[in-house]
Amino acid sequence: MSKELTIFVVDDDQAMRGSLRWLIESVGMRVETFDSAHAFLDAYYPGRAGCLLLDVRMPVMSGLELQEYLGRREIRIPVIIITGHGDVAMAVKAMKAGAVDFIEKPFDDEHLLNSIRKALQYDEQHRALHARKAEIAARLAELTPREHEVMAMVTDGKSNKEIAAALSVSAKTVEVHRARVMDKMRADSLAELVRMALVAGGDA
Amino acid sequence: MLALRDLGTDAPDQNRLGRYLPERSHSLAIGGVVKLPRISVKPTLFTLLRRLPMPVISIFIGLMAGLAVWITLDQVQSRAIERIFGRELSMRLDLRARESLIRFDQYMANYASTTRLLANHRRLAQYLEPLFWFPGEVVDPVIYAGFRPFWLPDVFGRNALLAPSHVLLVDSRGLVREIYQAGEQPLPEELTNDLGEWLGDLDEVRTVLARFDDSPYLVVSDRVEDASGYTMGSLVVLVPVDAGFLAASEGSFSADSSAVALVDADEQRILASNEPKQLIPGTLLSEWGDEYLVTSQSLPAYEGSNWNMLFATFIPQRSVAKMSSKVVDFERNQRLIAALVFITVFTLVIYLVSARLNKVLKRMTRFSQRALGIDQPGFNGGGNQLLLLEEWMQHFTSLVLRAREEMRRKHEHEMRETEALKAAIMEASLDSIVTLNRAGSVIDYNPTAEYTLGFDRDQIIGTDFVRAFIAPSDRANFIGLLQESRRRGPLGDRPHARTELRAVRNNEQLFPIEISIVPIALDDEPVYTLYIHDITKRKEAEREIKGLARFASESPSPILRVNGAARIVYANASSQPLMTAWETEPGGPLPIRWCDQVRETLEGGETREYEDDLSSAIYSLLFVPIQELGYVNIYARDITAVRRAEQESRQHQAELVHVCRLSTMGEVATGMAHELNQPLSAIVNYANGASRRLKSGQDERAPLIDAMAHISGQAQRAGEIIKRLRALVGKQQPIRSVVDLNLLVREVCSFVEFETAKLDMQIEQQLAEAPIPVDVDLVQIEQVLLNLVRNALDALEERAPGERALLVSTRRVGERGLVRVKDNGPGIPVQRMDLLFDPFFTTKESGMGMGLPISLTILEDHNGTIRAESEPGAGALFEVELPIAADAAGSGDEQTTMALADARDLNLLELPRLEGTHG
């Protein structure tokens, strides 16, 4: 898994890129460097695991602009902002836009590496949730419209009788639908089904 | 009053007497004040008249009138009747005559027709058959005397005609064969002699009145024909026209005793009449003129007569006279009735009038008792009401006159009182009151007038007021006012004519007056009362006020006054350019964009200041509301020059700032900080990476060496940057010039005018009176001072608007010029005082922390110093010290030592240390 994880470094300064690669690779992480936001966008494709180290001050497209661009595209890669001026306003802006952390140059190596680790962890969790959601969505897609209805009512905490009355079918039929829902959703218990419904709902 | 009392007491007696002796009452009444025309009636007759009641008099008058009517009518009517009857009589006579003639005519026509009937009788034709008579045989005619032959039936009698005296039967040869003779009278010879003449050429029946033996006859002849129309002979009928004939011809018509007669036209003699006893034949017509009215008519229809006859009709005068007298009697009766009716109506009318008068008199009595308080009105119900009324009228008139007299006295009394009151008012009046007659001469005056106008008491009355007291230039005006006052009338709702004029005092001194004229119509002569008020003091006050008011008009700046509707009600002369720019005029509206401001100012009640940037000029407008009058005064000021200066100064400032930007280390240092950060960060990263690798046993030499090379390279890069920085600072060569420190301070203060205005405060400048010449780089020192002032202003932002104070002062202490900037802001915390001049130290969020370090650098360059002191919470003080320019040095004194002694106490700070806060 860690093979797939990549630290993307975007900085216009060659010395900074080189030194950061040197430092991060020293803890055995994979590093890719880009000298501009555009270079990064050309090489990156969504789904690549990892995190992004961004210098705020860059010509053409600044770090904040890139972050905003990614946010608009719903590319949820964790971002760590590197500032050179102790510009609190800029940092706050970056954090508000969803940056995991910001670090000021010249930075403490431990601080940086901790931030990276935190970002990766966040990325991993995010990806797991995303995968789970995708899985549940796929299962939900298998359900017939009637089974969707039944599932919605079940997860709402309604009894078979109530569902039967609401859908104007027999309780027996409801039981059959319910069993099929449980089967299709691969839920072992009602509690699990409810959790799936929450995850799926959270996504929506 | 005496006369009045006399009359009052006498009144009842007089009234009582008046009833019997009316003439006395007259004389009494007239003897008073009244002069009435006296009715000239004889006393006795008057007494009689007075006693007679009206109805009696009316009957008397009625009788007299009736009599008069009678007599008049008698004269007029009798004549008229006679005339009418005369005409009537002649008309009747005419009518009667015609009728008689027609009857006569008719009667003769009857004979003609009867004769014709007879002539055509079958029997007669047969009788005359020539067979029986031998032609040429001359025989004497057969005479039937006294009896009718058989050929003569009694046709005349049957036709109610008188029988003829003779009937002759003539044969076809004209010979008389047979004669019928009714009476003894033989056939007249004249007829038989001229028979042929009488027969003539008979085609039809012929009727002729003829005269035989002085007697008139009717001769009727006709042919006798047989059945085949063959003439057998002729028949001649002879009828004497005598009384019987005439009577028969008139029939019963003569009942009215009229008569007819045949008259010989030549002799005017009666030949025959139907009343032979009265109208004897043979008498002349003229003999009957007294008894009868006669009309003669000719008888032209009967041609062939042997004499001239007239047919006369007689109407006896008697019958006419009788009728006339009957009519006169009847008319007399009518006249009597008319006279009686006249009397009755007259009496009745007068009676009614008198009854009415009685009522009126009664009412007057009541009125006299009630309204005039007279117990005895002077008359009662009896007597002649008209005279009584007249009496009462006289009495009433006397009463009225008496009352008038009383009123006049009362009025006189009141007048005297009013006069007294008026005199008092005139005396007391503070205004001069002068009365003029129509000609404009003084007829009355009061003491104030005497005092005010300063005239001579003895000569004033009759003086021409206009000429004496009105300034020549105002005389026309005054006369106009007089006329106007006359036009307005004396009293009423309209105000009196009033104006302001100049009057003359003592023939020389002019003074202003307010004059009001009231015309008063006294009898026919109008007089004018003038109320004159000396308004010298008021005029002075007005002049004073006007003088004050002229402030506005004299102002070189535009001053306008607008009303609530934003219309200009006043504009001084200087407003003209502004109004031209606004495209308006006095009385016109403000531009629309200012209307709302006027309203808001008026509503808000607070002075507001605006600016109007017109293309030609910029005006500052101060809107001052005058709420009680609903006006807004606009004080405009042409601030074009000021604004232009400000703009220039702003430009200057902008240039200054630009220079600052380029020259300050702050801006440079910002860039430098980033520049330096890059290599330093890289070095740190390389070093950390290397140490981590070594720690974790990744000890491949090549990468580590490579990293070391990187570190060395980045360190060199940092060194380059610092070198560049030093080169930049060192490159600045200040441009020195000698300037007045005061001037610098003033200029700097002007730079921040915007900021001070925003903070609603002013910088207090306490500058040395004498110039303080210093040899400095103008821009750099300005920058230092500007920086200090700006810092102070920033600090003052934390203070409440009214409490902000900033003092900038200059002074010269020996060879040094001092500038102090002192604010009452929050001050500088004690622990920060040490860091004040360190680079990158700042208390401000937006600051770089480079202002003071750079200032320090600049001042050190100028061989000057800067120091600061502060009392936290009470303010801060910065003092800049610069050496006096070399040329001007030497004028210093002992103040130097004092200043230096002061300086020692201050927390004087040296060069900044290099380590920054961060960034």
Image: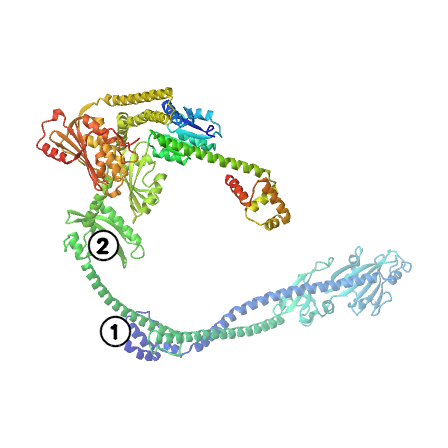
Q: Earlier in the sequence, mark 2 or mark 1?
A: 1
Q: Position of residue B618 (x, y in %)?
A: 30, 34
| Front position in the image: B145 or B702 | B702
Q: How many residues crowd mark 1 within 10 Å: few (<14), some (14–19), many (20+)? A: few
* B102 sits left or right of B856 in the view: right
Give the residue drawn at x 13%, y 24%. B886
Residue B531 is marked as: 2
| Front position in the image: B345 or B473 | B473
Disc 2 and disc 1: Cα gap in Å? 43 Å
Q: Chain of mark 1?
A: B
Question: Please, is residue B643 above or below residue B425 in the view?
Answer: above
Question: Please, is residue B160 above or below residue A43 in the view?
Answer: below
2 vs 1, front mark: 2
Q: Chain of mark 2?
A: B
Looking at the rendered structure, the kind of residue marked 1 is: Ala
Q: Position of residue B698 (x, y in %)?
A: 38, 24
Question: Please, is residue B312 above or below residue B465 in the view?
Answer: below
Q: Position of residue B122 (x, y in %)?
A: 87, 61
Residue to which mark 1 is pinned: B3
Q: Position of residue B546 (x, y in %)?
A: 22, 44
Question: Dot 1: what SS?
Answer: helix
Looking at the rendered structure, the kind of residue marked 2 is: Tyr
Task: Locate residue A183: give its quadrant.
Answer: top right
Q: Is residue B169 visible?
A: no
